[in-house]
Amino acid sequence: MKEKEYDFDDAEQGAIVKPARGKTRITIRIDTDILNWFRNQIHKAGGGNYQTLINDALREYIQQTNSTLERKLRKVIREELKVITK
C-alpha cells in the first residue's frame, strides 16, 4: 500500500485551534494543591471550567487590590486637604 503524500508548502506553524478573542495561550506552573482546589470546586459545582474559575479569582483579586489602593489614596488626600485648609 502506497502512503499518501502531503504538501506542507503553504502550511502555517502554530496552534490548530486559535484562542478565542481576548484570550492568550500561555504556559504557567501552578502548585498542584492550588490547581486541585480549583478542579475540585468545578467538580462540586457539577461542571464548568477550572480555567474560567482561576480567571475569575484573579480578576477579583485585582479589583480588591485596586479598591484598597483607591481607599488609601482617598485617605491620604483627605489628610493632606486637612493640613492645607488649616
Image: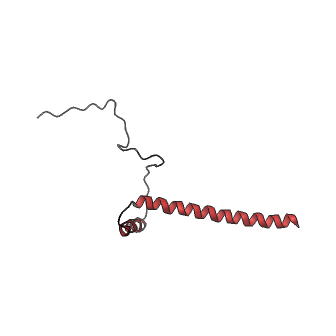
The C terminus sits in image quarter: bottom right
Left or right: residue 65 compared with residue 8: right
Picture layout, residue 85 above or below residue 25: below
**Closer-to-camera residue (28/19):** 19
* Residue 45 position within the rendered picture, expressed as x and y whole percent measured from the top left: 38, 68
Say which quarter of the image contains residue 66: bottom right
Left or right: residue 10 compared with residue 68: left
Left or right: residue 62 compared with residue 78: left
Residue drawn 38% across and 61% down?
Answer: 48
Picture layout, residue 67 above or below residue 26: below
Left or right: residue 53 compared with residue 59: left
Residue drawn 58% across and 61% down?
Answer: 63
**Closer-to-camera residue (43/26):** 43
How many numbered callouts? 0
* Residue 67 position within the rendered picture, expressed as x and y whole percent measured from the top left: 63, 63
Residue drawn 24% across and 32% down?
Answer: 6
Say which quarter of the image contains residue 38: bottom left
**Closer-to-camera residue (4/55):** 55
